[in-house]
Amino acid sequence: MSWSAYGHAFLGILAREFRRFLQQRTRFLSSLVRPLLWLVVFAAGFRAALGIAIIPPYETYITYEVYIVPGLVGIIILFNGMQSSLSMVYDREMGSMRVLLTSPLPRGYLLVCKLLSGALVSLAQVYAFLLLARLFDVEPPVLGYLWVLPATVLSALMLGALGLLLSSLIRQLENFAGVMNFVVFPLFFLSSALYPLWKMREASELIYWICAINPFTHAVELIRFALYGEFSVLAFTVTSATTVLLTMAAIVGFDPGRGLLRKSGPPRN
Amino acid sequence: MNMATAPIHVTELGHRYGKRRALAQVDFTLQAGEFLALLGPNGAGKTTLFSLLTRLLRATEGRIELFGLDLQGNARDALRRLGVVFQQPTLDLDLTVAQNLAYHGALQGLSPDTVRQRMEEELGRFGLSERAGDRVRSLNGGHRRRVEIARALLHEPKLLLLDEATAGLDLETRQALYEHVRSLCEERAMAVLWTTHLVEELSPTDATLILHQGRLVAQGTLQELQSQQGISSAKELLLALTRREP
């Protein structure tokens, strides 16, 4: 296979992801409404209850709205990652995943293309949300909008890989409700998305530690620092290492010889 | 007979799902330009065999060679020459016919120009050129199947695998698809493996493998098998060969 074949495959997968995304306008809207509700309703109620001290990367006292915007960017890409996992389960049931798997290009490469395409679709939603957030006085520095790009793509790759791995574990669409309860909500609530970790520590040392090792916390912190033009080495290291691990696990999950498809019977019709 | 480069050469193939045996000691060869029917009732192991041939599963026993290449080893060169039509629909209903074909072409590593040109040829041959811009959702079952076959032929494969390609179609459409695929064998010297549970789809002179409870119970043309068994109808032949063991 020539190098151009790899390029054609990536562009083909990217085009399909964007076409599907553009056709599901309600998905785009709901992906914006969800974080906006948090920002407008939840944050307004919470700002009175929660004082935010000066913590990096912020240099002054900030409102609660400013605090939760990176967390809400996190929830956009978390939902997208899970949505693409849902579409993988759906694809597999509908069979178009099989079309992908009978391609002569290496499976690992195709799955990475799929992850990257999903991450780029997320990026469009994140920027739309960040622009809307300006209406609510969340105005990070201009350069922050540039730095947040690689941070978002990396975080989206990590969460997409998690979704991909889950999709090789889940065989039925119905189980997706379980994913929401046992994956999405714990990842989101046990992270620094809604409240700073020191606040958590005041409540419970155990919960603090769970939050501190949650990779989603580090994805959110990577975005938070990037949005204010700073770079968190710890957040970057944890997020990229988790991305690599989850991607490798997901690729193994789709390997017919070693993978999780093997023991459970023939692909269903 | 050239075994070394035959489109399909399967030896002592077997597969287990955990402890459950789905396929055992299957041997057969499919030569270039040949049409081979794989016949068997539901649950005979056809889908398992099909999944092994398309590398969705990896065989636990035996060996599959496509074009002389071991599917466990250098599978990618073999996959490039392989066109597949799955039993279940695999088209994206919300995308147009052309977008579905373009996606497949890209996965095969074809350039957009090549895809456009090949798409015109294949859709034209199926009388679907005017439907290229329509969403698949608006197509009827017969047209969707034809799009799937056109898609499987897009990268000019030398081996076409069809798993119950006529499922859910009316008699006339089934017949038309069957004849179309038969003509592809002759025109393009393409090898075809046609999987079905309907014996009435096949012609008496078709080379046929009969699969039952994971094993090949007969090989030959339906005509030959009928005279061997002294049975006059193909339907009864299938019933006799696939009677469930008590």
Image (spheres, helix red, strand yellow):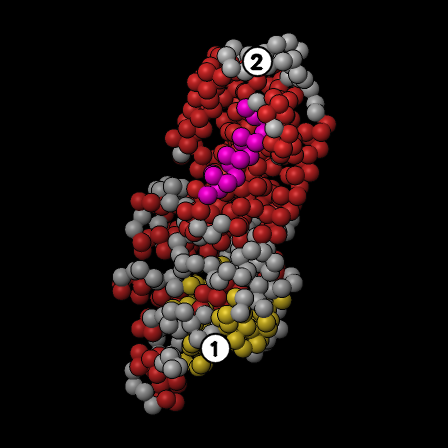
Q: Gap in Å between the C-alphas at discs 1 and 2?
A: 72 Å
Give the vertical position of B134 relative to B77 (above or below): above
Locate the N terminus of chain B by quadrant: bottom right
The label number, if any, that marks residue B215 in the structure image = 1
Measuring 44% from the left and 26% from the top, which residue is drawn there?
A34
Give the vertical position of B206 relative to A45 (above or below): below
Foreground residue among B162 and B43: B43
Percent across and percent down for residue B118 are 47, 50
Residue type at mark 1: give it. Arg
On the question of residue A70 being in view, the answer is no
Locate the C terminus of chain B by quadrant: bottom left
Percent across and percent down for residue B74 are 65, 61
The label number, if any, that marks residue A47 in the structure image = none
Say if the magenta span includes residue A184.
yes
| B118 on left or right of A237 | left
Q: Judging from the image, what secondary structure is the residue with disc 1 in?
A: strand
Measuring 47% from the left and 77% from the top, which residue is drawn there?
B215
Foreground residue among A54 and A22: A54
Measuring 32% from the left and 87% from the top, which residue is drawn there?
B231
Please name the residue that numbered disc 2 is placed on.
A51
Measuring 31% from the left and 78% from the top, which residue is drawn there?
B235
Residue range of the region highlighted in magenta in the rendering: A178-194
Residue A4 falls in which quadrant of the image?
Answer: top right
Foreground residue among B192 and B57: B57
Give the vertical position of A248 relative to B13 (above or below): above
Which chain contains the residue that carries disc 2? A
Percent across and percent down for residue A76 are 51, 29
Dominant secondary structure of the residues highlighted in magenta in the image: helix
Give the vertical position of B244 relative to B88 (above or below): below
Residue type at mark 2: give it. Gly
